[in-house]
Amino acid sequence: MKVQSCKVLLKDVKLFGYHGVLSQERVVGAYYYLNIAVETDFERAMETDELVGTLSYADIFEVVRREMSVPSQLLEHLAGRTCRAILDRFPAAHTVHLEILKENPPMGADCQSAGVSVDVRR
């Protein structure tokens, strides 16, 4: 068997945060949904059944949670900061795909969510 790609995934993570261009958004806050995919080589974990051969999704979540707790005006800035923190914390991470969606954004439209998506690599 030849492995082509390995990713650790966190889907539809719901967190509360204080991000937005409008000052009211940084006071009231909103819910955000995040999807994270971190590409790494976990072939060792596939063979050994040991955590040391992969990245812990719980540890990735802690990095994301910490970054979400720091207010930003722009989701783009938050996304860049979060991706950088993941790559800094996990040397075995090759790429990070991150989506951040703000629930019910204040833009005068009937919209479930709006946000950003970014793919970064080391």
Image (cartoon, rainbow, N blue to C red):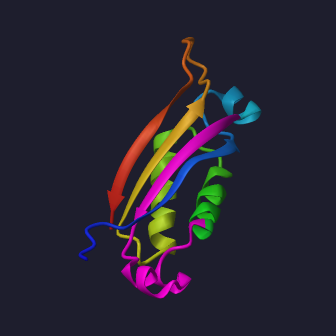
Name the foreground residue: 14 vs 118. Answer: 14
Which residue occupies 51% across, 83% down? 49
Against 73, is 49 above or below?
A: below
Q: Is residue 112 visible?
A: yes
Which residue occupies 55% across, 46% down? 34
Which residue occupies 76% across, 31% down? 28
Against 70, is 76 above or below?
A: above
Q: Please say whether residue 52 is one of the residues in the magenta stretch.
A: yes
Where's the C terminus, which quadrant? bottom left
Tell which residue pokes out farthest to the front in this image.
Answer: 1
Name the foreground residue: 60 vs 74. Answer: 60
Name the foreground residue: 4 vs 31. Answer: 4
- Left or right for 7, reference 66: left
- Left or right for 116, reference 59: left
Which residue occupies 61% across, 61% down? 61
Percent x, y of residue 69: 68, 52
Against 115, is 106 above or below?
A: above
- The range drawn in magenta is 30-57
Number of numbered discs: 0
Percent x, y of residue 44: 40, 85
User: Which image quadrant for residue 95?
Assistant: bottom left
- Left or right for 30, reference 75: right
Where's the N terminus, which quadrant? bottom left
Q: Please say whether residue 79 is one of the residues in the magenta stretch.
A: no
Name the foreground residue: 19 vs 34. Answer: 34
Tell which residue pokes out farthest to the right in this image.
Answer: 28
